[in-house]
Amino acid sequence: MKKTLSLFILLFVSVSLFAQGKAKYVFYFIGDGMGADQVNGTEMYLAEKEGMIGVKPLIFTQFPVMSVVNTYSRTNSVTDSSAAGTALATGEKTYNGAIGVGKDKEKLTSVAERAKKAGKKVGVITSVSVDHATPAAFYAHQPDRGMYYEIAHDLPLANFDFYGGSGFLKPDKNAEGENAPSIYPMFEKAGYKLYRGLDEYSQSSRDEKLILIQKEGSDKNALPYAIDRKAGDLALKEITQSAIEHLSYKNNKGFFLMVEGGKIDWACHDNDAATVFHEVIDMDEAIAEAFAFYKKHPKETLIVVTADHETGGIALGTGKYALNLQSLQYQKVSANQLSTLMSNLRKEKNNNVTWEDMKQLLGENMGFWKEVKLTWEQERKLRDEFEHSFVQKKQGFEESMYTKTEPMAARAKEVMNEVAMVSWASHSHSANFVPVFAIGVGAELFNARLNNIDIPHNISKAAGYKW
């Protein structure tokens, strides 16, 4: 209670600091796919876990400024991540698929590049690959988001000080799919040191330009989902800590740091509610690192939290005047990891999996028949899919934007959504409003309904970057 009261007092006092000076330190958090109900659902889930009806606030939702943001692109009412990322980075609308370029493929200057020109240190970090759409929009200029090799070649040209994420998707294949020289020697030649994991990073020099990615052999596509994380896995919070340490070291001029919670979007594409809420919590833990920095520098720091678009059209309720979000706490793995466990079970049992084997796996990882009681119809749905894909062996993986899933895992996820009373409109993006939250110097600039292109302009105004 004392901790919460202290936070509210600090937030109240911060309102009086809005108009004082320029933001020397800027944190720009982007929750990919994070609409208002992804945030609201997370807070209601946390409350229900503690036996309460209502919300248990995240750190960033307690910031004194909050509003809503339109996300449409130049070419469509429903944006993709590259056009939305470009809008949030450059303050210009563009076509779906563009990375840091305008409608005629002309180069656009990002707020991060403006910060660098203003003499600030700059960092760009994410929970997915460094060359993915949102982070790329801050340093790269390419006509197509799928040009990962070419995007990586733009990284040293921006001359930023810190990059972090899971890795690089195509380090040695160009847009035509042809073999090409590896990007890593190119990074080294440009003066960057590459560190794989926190153990290597601990040996780094704070005055060098660097790139922090996962350990050798890890998934280059993304960090593990928070719900699946194991000891030793790299987390967004840890990359954020490292970036703050690096950018603030012997730095009197200030810094700009963009942080993307990239896998909120992935879990929404999968319609996996429990995993979504864990990803929002995970980003909040990264924001906590920025907030701790803010408390030490309240008159010099701005923190902005927003999203590029909403994904999935999540709805908290399925017809009854009720929710059962607390049931999601018994889901121990993502739907993607559950699919892997099922595939492993097939191999272990030489493709002769019994219904009792499957019930045990679902009980251990989803809480079914134990903490989570199922209706006859829900159990029938699971049993029918088991008969189809495990007994008759008519297996066909189901695909969403980023994953291929065992159909049995997909049915289990659907049942969990039914139990929790969460529904989804699609497996893709929507044109729904997204939220924006702000605290610190210049936060009053975000106290109105905004278009996504307004946000980098307002950050530049608060920080005094030349536009």
Image (tube, rainbow, N blue to C red):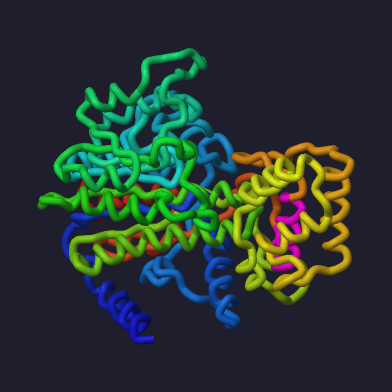
- Nearest the viewer among 433 and 326 is 326
Residue 23 placed where, x, y %? 21, 57
Residue 198 placed where, x, y %? 31, 48
**Residue shown at the point (63%, 59%) measured from the top left:** 273
- Nearest the viewer among 143 and 330 is 330
Report the magenta residues as a range: 409-423
Instruction: Judge whether 425 appears above or below 53 on screen.
Output: above
Please tell me in which quadrant of the rendered image residue 159 appears. top left
Residue 133 shows in the view: no
**Residue shown at the point (51%, 31%) measured from the top left:** 97
Please tell me in which quadrant of the rendered image residue 76 appears. top right
- Nearest the viewer among 411 and 139 is 411
- Nearest the viewer among 389 and 13 is 389
Q: Does the magenta stretch include residue 65?
A: no
Image quarter (top left, top right, bottom left or bottom right) of the N terminus: bottom left
Q: Classify residue 64 as left or right of residue 228.
A: left
Q: Is residue 422 magenta?
A: yes
Please tell me in which quadrant of the rendered image residue 122 appears. top left
Instruction: Judge whether 216 appears above or below 277 on screen.
Output: above
Residue 448 placed where, x, y %? 41, 62
Q: Is the magenta stretch mostly helix, strand or loop?
A: helix
The total of numbered circles placed on residues is: 0
Residue 22 shows in the view: yes
Image quarter (top left, top right, bottom left or bottom right) of the C terminus: top left
Q: Classify residue 95 as left or right of residue 445.
A: right
Residue 57 placed where, x, y %? 46, 73
Instruction: Judge whether 37 appears above or below 171 on screen.
Output: below
Q: Classify residue 419 as left or right of residue 236.
A: right
Q: Classify residue 346 as left or right of residue 446.
A: right
**Residue shown at the point (41%, 52%) measured from the top left:** 232
**Residue shown at the point (50%, 48%) measured from the top left:** 224
